[in-house]
Image (cartoon, helix red, strand yellow):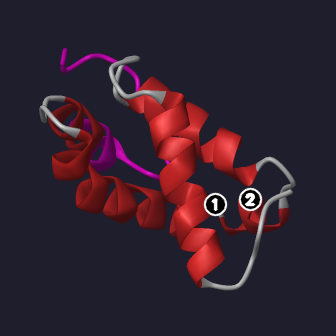
Amino acid sequence: MKSHAKIMDRQVGRNSELFARAVAGMETREARYPYLRILVSVIEHAHPEWNQAPNKDRQIAHSINVMSEGRLDMDEVAEVVRVRDEERGYYYD
């Protein structure tokens, strides 16, 4: 990462971007899963207004995809968001 590169999302921060890139370097979905949950949680705290969005899973997945420079699959991240929401009692159609 270049030191002069702009932060994708100031509310989430540079450390989260670096974390997303590190998670993207992990080989398997199973290895990435717990770290993706942490990253999703950070974004949910930074953007509480997204909690009511009908496409929250895709919105967060897109954000993480951009933070990882396109190395994390949006479908994989969206699935993690949906699992977290289902644990809280919110189900997608």
Q: CA distance from mark 1 to mark 2?
A: 6 Å
The residue under the point 31% across, 38% down is 17
Magenta stretch secondary structure, dominant: loop
Q: Residues within 10 Å of mark 1 (few under 14, many from 20)?
A: few
Q: Is there a contact, CB below 8 Å, between mark 1 and mark 2? A: yes
The answer to whether residue 43 is above or below residue 45 is above
Q: How many marks?
A: 2
Asked if residue 16 lies left or right of residue 31, the reply is right
Whether residue 43 appears in magenta in the rendering, the answer is: no
Whether residue 11 can be seen here: no
Whether residue 14 appears in magenta in the rendering, the answer is: yes
Residue range highlighted in magenta: 1-18
Viewer-proximal residue among 14 and 55: 55
Q: Secondary structure at mark 1?
A: loop
Viewer-proximal residue among 31 and 51: 31
The residue under the point 19% across, 21% down is 3
The picture quadrant where one finds residue 28 is: top left
**Kind of residue at disc 2:** Trp
Q: Position of residue 88 (x, y in %)?
A: 63, 84
Which numbered tag is attached to residue 47? 1
The answer to whether residue 53 is above or below residue 5 is below
The picture quadrant where one finds residue 91 is: bottom right
Which numbered tag is attached to residue 50? 2
